[in-house]
Image: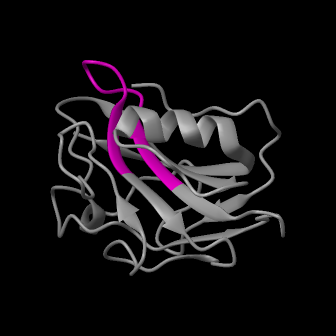
Amino acid sequence: MQIPQPDLARSITVTSPRFAEGDPLPDRYTCKGDGLPPELNWVGVPAEARSVALVVSDPDAPRGTFLHWLLTGLPAAGKGLPEGGAPPGAREWPNSGRSARWVPPCPPSGTHRYFFGVYALDSQVVGSTTEQVLQQIARHTIAWGTLHGVVSH
């Protein structure tokens, strides 16, 4: 699975009140706890953005990058996501487990990195598969940023 890595400087700042950049994710957000998606906040979405997408991935998964969550249709004027799930109007796409929902981190061994990528897009995403949507995100990103946390087994 090819996670978008736009050839642009990261100009969106992504934060969470639940963990800092590079810190462990609290158990509440993993398979050891409630398995909820954490609250996220962002700033720096350009005024010309038409929508925002969120891609949560684990590049350290045993069989290659694991897509934990793919959301599109987030409002460009939005400033983040509340804890617990997709907001009304957003679309969840199938993840690496083939379900259109958040899959909480649960590494089989070692320490894994989990990247929360926020992408400002110059259009709405059009596609019928996860791969097509990821390609559209890569093509239409005008600004982006990431926050990453870690989970150890």
Residue 89 lies left or right of residue 46; in this view the side is: left
Q: Position of residue 128 (x, y in %)?
A: 35, 43
Q: Quadrant of the C terminus?
A: top left
* Vertical comparison of 131 with 28: above or below: above
Q: Position of residue 130 (x, y in %)?
A: 36, 39
Q: Position of residue 112 (x, y in %)?
A: 36, 35
Residue 111 lies left or right of residue 10; in this view the side is: left
Q: Position of residue 9 (x, y in %)?
A: 83, 40
In front of the other: 87 or 103: 87
Residue farthest top in this picture: 63
Determine the residue positioned at 20% across, 45% down. Answer: 106
Using the rendered view, name the quadrant where residue 78 is placed.
Answer: bottom right
Determine the residue positioned at 25% across, 20% down. Answer: 62
Residue 109 lies left or right of residue 147; in this view the side is: left
Using the rendered view, name the quadrant where residue 90 is placed.
Answer: bottom left
* Vertical comparison of 18 with 152: above or below: below
Determine the residue positioned at 25% across, 18% down. Answer: 63
- Number of marks: 0
In front of the other: 18 or 93: 93
In front of the other: 18 or 119: 119
Using the rendered view, name the quadrant where residue 33 is placed.
Answer: bottom left
Residue 30 is at least partly visible in this image:
yes
Q: Quadrant of the N terminus?
A: top left
In front of the other: 2 or 51: 51
Residue 63 magenta: yes
Residue 113 is at least partly visible in this image:
no
Determine the residue positioned at 17% across, 70% down. Answer: 34
Magenta residues? 54-69
Residue 56 magenta: yes
